[in-house]
Amino acid sequence: MVITRGWSAFLVAVGVWTWVIWPRFGLAIWKDPRAWSAGEIGHGSPTSFLWVHALLIAASLAIGTVVGVLGVRAWRRAPR
């Protein structure tokens, strides 16, 4: 399969976008009182709200990394 440079750049952009957006979302979830059993940031044990979002963020970062790496590899092999 041959991927054009345009699509390769798109894949790289998606990978970068993932790493720009999801960590910021993770910080917002961490600072949300619903993420902690005591209702205060960093106090008490983590709630299911935090765990579910942490899993979503981890999965999204993993997928974004794979997409970005595929984009870089396709860029290197794409005809000019």
Image: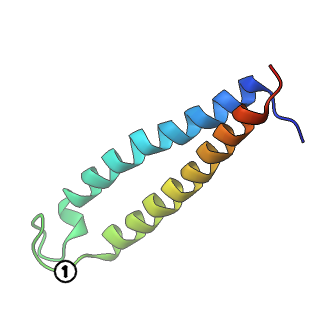
Give the side of residue 44 with respect to residue 5, left or right: left
Seen in the picture, residue 43 relative to 56 is either above or below; the reply is: below
Locate the N terminus and report the quarter of the image it occupies. Answer: top right
Seen in the picture, residue 22 relative to 57 is either above or below; the reply is: above
Q: In this rendered view, identify the residue nearer to me: 33 or 60.
A: 60
Question: In percent of the image, x 28 and y 76: which residue is there?
Answer: 47
The color scheme shown is rainbow
Locate the C terminus and report the quarter of the image it occupies. Answer: top right
Question: In percent of the image, x 53 and y 58: which residue is there?
Answer: 62
Seen in the picture, residue 29 relative to 43 is either above or below; the reply is: above
x, y (%) of residue 32?
21, 58
Give the side of residue 54 with respect to residue 68, left or right: left
x, y (%) of residue 6?
73, 23
Seen in the picture, residue 60 relative to 51 is either above or below; the reply is: above
Q: Quadrant of residue 51?
A: bottom left
According to the image, label 1 marks what residue? 45
Q: How many marks?
A: 1
Q: Residue furthest right?
A: 1
Q: In this rendered view, identify the residue nearer to me: 77 or 4.
A: 77
Question: In percent of the image, x 71 and y 32: which residue is there?
Answer: 75
x, y (%) of residue 50?
32, 68
